[in-house]
Image (cartoon, rainbow, N blue to C red):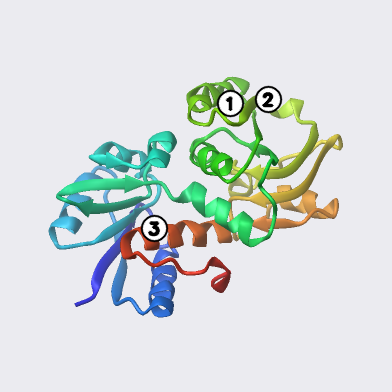
């Protein structure tokens, strides 16, 4: 009988997780069935419990339930504790386990592009949950300095005070969007600007070698500006595939090669 997996969210029909996990299964010879589950906004916990009661093996969590999933878990990985959000669930020894594979997905997408993270200096624009989830994996992959730029400076400063203890080997700094300047190896857009159609203006005295847009499939003024400077760019589809591969390997003990799917 096929192993049962699902992705849970609200809305859910846009999720590409089923096609990704079925592609990984085909490549690795694993027999699985992966479905979408729409949970009512007030029915996340009962939906998760029902899935595992019905012998489900693993579940991915998408918006708006990642923080609720974090609160529901009895065992958490280090990166989930730091992210304060969970996107990957599984049952082990009768306990609900949670991980956050988003940051590792980003790291592996960047590595698949052959952009060097060792001793890198990175600028992340935005100080929301997406940024919180990627700091620890980026530092573990070799980033030496990360500057978080946000419209509200206090939010970026709060994030740094929350996370600095987890990554003592790296230097974390905050700045306002109006203070953007300097030289970086990589700039990551973790804001929702491309999703909302907002323009994110990059000043002329900001210099960088690579640009990564976490969103994908939408026009991005951030990437347009990077391209106009002749900077290599990528949007977030690789990150999506990377986080899915990481979840697949946790559940199935086999890790597909990211480059086969992007």
Q: Is residue 104 left or right of residue 182?
A: left
Question: What residue appears at the point 45 percent right and 62 percent down from the top-left corner?
Answer: 245
- Circle 2 is placed at which residue position? 175
**Marks 1 & 2, CB-CB < 8 Å contact:** yes
- Circle 3 is placed at which residue position? 247
Within-10-Å neighbours for mark 1: few <14, some 14–19, many 20+: many
Query: Which label sits in the foreground, 2 or 3?
Result: 3
Choose the circle earlier in sequence order: 1 or 3. Answer: 1
Give the CA distance from mark 1 to mark 3: 28 Å
Within-10-Å neighbours for mark 2: few <14, some 14–19, many 20+: many
Give the CA distance from mark 2 to mark 3: 33 Å
Secondary structure beneath disc 3?
helix
- Residue 202 is drawn in which quadrant? top right
Question: What residue appears at the point 50 percent right and 62 percent down from the top-left corner?
Answer: 241
- Circle 1 is placed at which residue position? 156
Nearest the viewer among 110 and 139 is 139
- Residue 250 is drawn in which quadrant? bottom left
Picture quarter with the C terminus: bottom right
Q: Is residue 97 left or right of residue 137?
A: left
- Residue 191 is drawn in which quadrant? top right
Choose the circle earlier in sequence order: 1 or 2. Answer: 1
* Residue 82 pos. (x, y %): 43, 34
Whether residue 43 is visible here, answered yes or no, is: no
Within-10-Å neighbours for mark 3: few <14, some 14–19, many 20+: many
Vertical order, 90 against 69 (above or below): below
């Amino acid at each position: 009988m096929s192993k049962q997996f699902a992705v849970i969210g609200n809305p859910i029909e846009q999720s590409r997780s089923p096609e990704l996990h079925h592609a990984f299964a085909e490549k690795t010879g694993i027999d699985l069935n992966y479905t979408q589950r729409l949970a009512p906004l007030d029915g996340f916990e009962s939906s998760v419990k029902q899935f595992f009661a019905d012998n489900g093996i693993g579940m991915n969590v998408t918006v708006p339930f990642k923080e609720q999933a974090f609160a529901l878990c009895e065992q958490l990985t280090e990166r989930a504790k730091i992210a304060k959000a969970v996107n990957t669930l599984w049952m082990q020894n009768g306990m609900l386990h949670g991980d956050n594979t988003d940051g590792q997905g980003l790291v592996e997408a960047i590595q698949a592009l052959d952009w060097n993270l060792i001793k890198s200096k990175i600028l992340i624009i935005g100080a929301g949950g997406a940024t919180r989830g990627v700091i620890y994996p980026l530092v573990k992959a070799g980033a030496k300095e990360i500057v978080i730029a946000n419209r509200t400076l206090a939010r970026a400063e709060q994030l740094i005070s929350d996370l600095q203890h987890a990554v003592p080997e790296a230097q974390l700094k905050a700045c306002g969007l109006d203070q953007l300047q300097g030289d970086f190896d990589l700039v990551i857009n973790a804001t929702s600007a491309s999703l909302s159609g907002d323009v994110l203006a990059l000043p002329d005295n900001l210099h960088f070698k690579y640009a990564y847009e976490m969103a994908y499939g939408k026009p991005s003024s951030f990437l347009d500006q990077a391209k106009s400077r002749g900077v290599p760019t990528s949007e977030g589809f690789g990150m999506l595939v990377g986080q899915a591969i990481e979840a697949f390997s946790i559940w199935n003990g086999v890790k597909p090669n990211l480059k086969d799917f992007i």
